[in-house]
């Protein structure tokens, strides 16, 4: 029935399904979950135990905290249009079923049943707990859908170092196999470290090159007319000759961590390999699935190709 309902809505509403999101809900069983000695089963044999763990850092003390919720019952998994707030697909599983696995399975099943929905969908949101390289790659590579899933902070090695400063974001070399000046954070921001002064600057984001499936960045000194004593040395680290345009850094999605590097809100124009100059994403990076998705609905969109969104 839900397939017929969503396809009927797609006929009536031309923009229905453009902005989809996923979320789950714990459903308690009436059973206590205790196993009967005689039968060896619970009073609800189809249900089982689930656990949901939430972690964070106390804003006042800086101490990490963990909250664990356990329940006996089921998990309800939904894909919904986040603009109209109407469900388009659902699945009910025992509570122990992984949300990550259910998300990908439900996406594949829904788009196989209604291919037009996959063609119509432009972005797909989910909360930070569902951050996954496999999920983001599935959405973009298989369906050309932009994933709106905030990145979890999973880097731990640097925090164990004696010189770790919690007030500064952790950075890692973009090209660890060679000596270079380009570093990145777990949130996906890309920077250069001046070989002369040690100053760290944000690279100038130039857009997404659809034909290369790559994010494009430019030397900030060249882009913004800044004085940089290490500009020539930085270019040589990248194996290029210094020029007026400055060093270009391209991050091909398939060559880097797909959990961290995702297609941004801007891309090359439809039918063109040119790159649009663009400002970095100014929408929300944390918060609810609905907030992320509703922010996306306000962006101007062009006719569908290997997506080409322009943030106003």
Image (tube, helix red, strand yellow):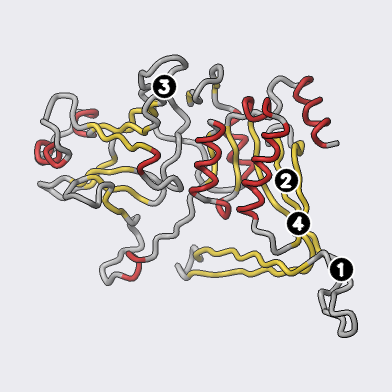
> Mark 3 or mark 1, which has the lower sequence index?
1
Q: Which residue is mark 4?
A: 93
User: Of helix, strand and loop, which one carries label 4?
Assistant: strand
Residue 40: image x %, image y %?
84, 80
For discs 3 and 4, the disc positioned in front in the rendered view: 4
> Mark 1 or mark 2, which has the lower sequence index?
1
For discs 3 and 1, the disc positioned in front in the rendered view: 1
User: Of helix, strand and loop, which one carries label 3?
Assistant: loop
Q: Residue 286 vs residue 26: left or right?
A: left
Please give the label number shown on residue 78: 2
Image point (40%, 60%), residue name: 155
Along the viewing direction, whichever of 198 and 179 lies nearer the viewer: 179
Say whether marks 3 and 1 touch (CB < 8 Å): no
The answer to whether residue 113 is above or below residue 28 is above
> Mark 3 or mark 2, which has the lower sequence index?
2
How many marks on residues? 4
């Amino acid at each position: 029935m839900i397939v017929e309902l969503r396809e009927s809505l797609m006929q009536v509403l031309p923009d229905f399904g453009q902005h989809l999101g996923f979320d789950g809900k714990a459903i308690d069983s009436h059973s206590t979950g205790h196993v009967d000695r005689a039968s060896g089963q619970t009073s609800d044999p189809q249900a089982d135990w689930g656990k949901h763990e939430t972690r964070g850092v106390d804003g006042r003390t800086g101490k990490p905290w963990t909250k664990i919720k356990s329940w006996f019952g089921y998990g309800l998994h939904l894909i919904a249009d986040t603009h109209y707030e109407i469900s388009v697909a659902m699945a009910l599983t025992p509570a122990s079923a992984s949300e990550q696995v259910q998300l990908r399975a439900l996406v594949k099943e829904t788009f196989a049943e209604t291919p037009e929905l996959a063609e119509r969908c432009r972005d797909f949101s989910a909360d930070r707990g569902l951050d996954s390289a496999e999920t983001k790659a599935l959405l973009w590579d298989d369906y050309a859908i932009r994933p709106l899933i905030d990145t979890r902070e999973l880097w731990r090695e640097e925090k164990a170092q004696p010189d770790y400063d919690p007030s500064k974001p952790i950075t890692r070399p973009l090209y660890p196999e060679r000596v270079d000046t380009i570093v990145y954070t777990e949130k996906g921001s890309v920077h250069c470290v001046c070989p002369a002064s040690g100053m760290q600057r944000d690279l100038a984001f130039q857009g997404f090159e659809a034909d290369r499936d790559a994010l494009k960045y430019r030397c900030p000194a060249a882009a913004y007319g800044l004085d940089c004593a290490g500009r020539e040395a930085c270019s040589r680290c990248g194996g290029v000759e210094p020029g007026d345009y400055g060093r270009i850094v391209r991050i091909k999605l398939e060559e880097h961590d797909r959990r961290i590097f995702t297609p941004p809100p801007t891309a090359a124009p439809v039918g063109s390999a040119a790159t649009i100059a663009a400002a970095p994403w100014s929408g929300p990076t944390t918060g609810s699935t609905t907030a992320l998705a509703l922010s996306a609905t306000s962006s101007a969109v062009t006719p569908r190709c290997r997506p080409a969104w322009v943030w106003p």
